[in-house]
Image (tube, rainbow, N blue to C red):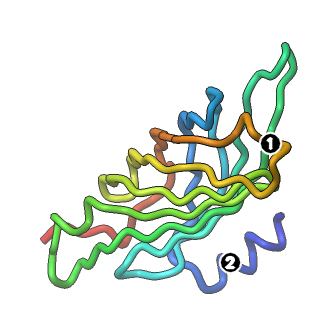
Amino acid sequence: MILLGIGFNSFSQEILIPIGYVYNQKHNLHLGLDVQLTKETFFIVGISSNTTFNNGKLKSLPEVHASIIPFSSENNNLFLSCFMTEIASTKEYFNPNLGFSIANIIKLKAGYNFLYKSQYQDAKGITFGLVFSLGSMKNFKIM
């Protein structure tokens, strides 16, 4: 993971730590590592873990995700920068999301889990979350 982070850091603009609450038919703590790959449009890829209590034990489900926030500091289109799309995937499901973002610091998202296998029926359904991205936003400029 450290080597992956060093490799991303050589061509990335930002490294962020997303932390928050995600509901995927269970209440989850969402914690991960994101890398912003572009300066103008926020194209972000990352890995994270959704952790929950299951029968008195901690259960963690790793996921990979990519999100786009169409912000541009050159044309200052603040209206457009409020929307985001995200695609996440785990070993159990595929989850597309739509939502709102405030400068990629606060994300409010909703989506639906599409299952890979029928054995994970308890993960199928509507999802939502509130995630905060911790890290510097040196490329975010307003006017």
Occupied quadrant, residue 87: bottom right
Question: How many numbered callouts?
Answer: 2
* Looking at the image, residue 57 lies above or below residue 52: above
Q: CA distance from mark 2 to mark 1?
A: 33 Å
The amino acid on which the numbered mark 1 sits, given as a three-letter code, is: Tyr
**Image check: 74 left or right of 118?**
left
For the point 64% across and 32% down, which residue is it? 28
Q: Which mark is residue 8?
A: 2
For the point 78% across and 44% down, which residue is it? 61
Question: Residue 66: percent from the left, percent from the top?
Answer: 57, 68
The amino acid on which the numbered mark 2 sits, given as a three-letter code, is: Phe
Circle 2 — which element? helix
Q: Residue furthest front?
A: 118
Occupied quadrant, residue 79: bottom left
For the point 39% across and 51% down, which residue is it? 105
Q: Which mark is residue 120?
A: 1
Question: Residue 38: percent from the left, percent from the top?
Answer: 46, 82
**Image check: 79 left or right of 17?**
left
Closer to the camera, 20 or 25?
Answer: 25
